[in-house]
Image (cartoon, rainbow, N blue to C red):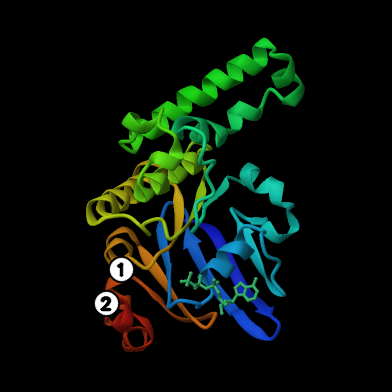
């Protein structure tokens, strides 16, 4: 499979602290890649570099053959790149359906002027956005919560709504930052199945940052392990589970 994401010699320091240190890895199209490591290893900073929230000091990133760092932040959606956040970035006073519909690119296509004037094109775009939002919620088993205000939902369900909002834009590359945090075992297992299905059935490429090792080991095709911003191992879940350095640096404590 061709590479969906290629990271080459990426580095970023915060006042001397090397949060990302000469990091290279690649993710094949249609696969699920886990990015794991202890607290403070640099995982979120890596995602921030890959989504243009942070600017690396050095290195190159290409997404589907395009030089990502040469693109403005607002061009990421056009490249098919979406991200979910460790701390929820939902509008908590709006319903789940409203939040998901907002993630739909089709909803913005009519433009703000048409929206303000209530033109038919804007109404049509809105209808498409809401129909897709309903479909996406249903695909994640969330149809029952569409009309609920997000603030009233359990945290694990809010995380799934955030995933739905990313999926409604139909990304080709989805980066997820700790999607299972706050989920119970059943929710996390369902999330693992959903992630696998997205890759297998829709050909989506997924980069998964997660501490839930059950989810990582069951959902990922390959795993990259970072410690202090550096890659210490890369391989299949079986290889990573058996890697002495990974066990010493991370899995020992993750399993504890
Ligand atoms: N904006 C910032 N300014 C200064 N230091 C930062 C900043 N963001 C992150 N760091 C530091 O960079 C290092 C990597 O942090 P990061 O949040 O990327 O780790 P992480 O692997 O995502 O951790 P966790 O698993 O706890 O979420 C940490 O030492 C952190 O304190």
Seen in the picture, residue 69 relative to 169 is either above or below; the reply is: below
Q: Quadrant of residue 44?
A: bottom right
Taking the image as shown, residue 163 lies to the left or right of residue 62, namely left
Choose the circle earlier in sequence order: 1 or 2: 1
Query: Which element carries disc 1, helix, strand or loop?
Result: helix
- Circle 2 residue: 255
Could you tell me which residue is drawn at 73 percent across and 53 percent down?
71
Q: Which residue lies furthest to the left in this view?
A: 186
Q: In which quarter of the image is residue 240?
A: bottom left
Taking the image as shown, residue 110 lies to the left or right of residue 124, namely right
Estimate the x, y position of residue 192 in percent, counting from the top left.
30, 53
**Image quarter in which the C terminus is found:** bottom left
Could you tell me which residue is drawn at 34 percent across and 30 percent down?
143
**Image quarter in which the N terminus is found:** bottom left
Q: How many marks?
A: 2
Could you tell me which residue is drawn at 50 percent across and 38 percent down?
170
Seen in the picture, residue 151 relative to 176 is either above or below; the reply is: above
Q: Does the residue labelled 1 lie within 8 Å of ligand 1?
A: no
Disc assigned to residue 213 = 1
Could you tell me which residue is drawn at 62 percent across and 57 percent down?
51
Q: Which of 210 and 81 is in front in this view?
A: 210
Query: Which element carries disc 2, helix, strand or loop?
Result: helix
Q: Nearer the viewer, residue 23 or 131?
A: 131
Category of crowding for the residue at label 1, using alpha-carbon neighbours closer than 10 angstroms: few (below 14), some (14–19), many (at least 20): some
Taking the image as shown, residue 155 lies to the left or right of residue 16, namely left
Seen in the picture, residue 5 relative to 149 is either above or below; the reply is: below
Q: Mark 1 touching mark 2, by CB under 8 A?
A: yes
Estimate the x, y position of residue 12 in percent, counting from the top left.
66, 76
Taking the image as shown, residue 144 lies to the left or right of residue 19, namely left
Q: Which of 15 and 6 is in front in this view?
A: 15
Category of crowding for the residue at label 2, using alpha-carbon neighbours closer than 10 angstroms: few (below 14), some (14–19), many (at least 20): few
Q: Which residue lies furthest to the top in this view?
A: 120
């Amino acid at each position: 499979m061709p590479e969906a994401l290629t990271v080459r010699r990426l580095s970023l320091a915060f006042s001397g602290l090397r949060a990302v240190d000469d990091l290279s890895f690649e993710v094949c199209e249609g696969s699920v890649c886990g990015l794991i490591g202890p607290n403070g290893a640099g995982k979120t900073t890596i995602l921030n570099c890959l989504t243009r929230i942070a600017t690396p000091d050095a290195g190159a990133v290409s997404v589907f053959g395009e030089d990502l760092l040469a693109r403005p932040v607002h061009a990421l959606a056009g490249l098919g790149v979406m991200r979910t956040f460790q701390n929820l970035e939902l509008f908590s006073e709006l319903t789940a359906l409203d939040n998901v519909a907002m993630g739909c690119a089709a909803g913005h296509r009519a433009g703000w002027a048409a929206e303000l004037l209530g033109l038919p094109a804007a109404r049509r775009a809105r209808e498409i956005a809401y129909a897709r939002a309903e479909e996406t919620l249903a695909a994640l088993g969330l149809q029952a919560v569409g009309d609920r205000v997000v603030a009233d939902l359990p945290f694990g369900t809010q995380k799934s709504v955030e995933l739905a909002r990313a999926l409604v834009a139909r990304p080709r590359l989805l980066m997820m930052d700790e999607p299972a945090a706050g989920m119970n075992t059943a929710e996390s297992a369902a999330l693992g199945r959903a992630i696998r299905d997205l890759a297998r059935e829709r050909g989506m490429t997924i980069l998964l940052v997660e501490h839930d090792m059950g989810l990582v080991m069951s959902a990922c095709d390959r795993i990259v392990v970072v410690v202090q911003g550096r890659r210490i191992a890369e391989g299949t879940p079986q290889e990573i589970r058996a890697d002495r350095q990974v066990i010493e640096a991370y899995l020992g404590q993750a399993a504890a």
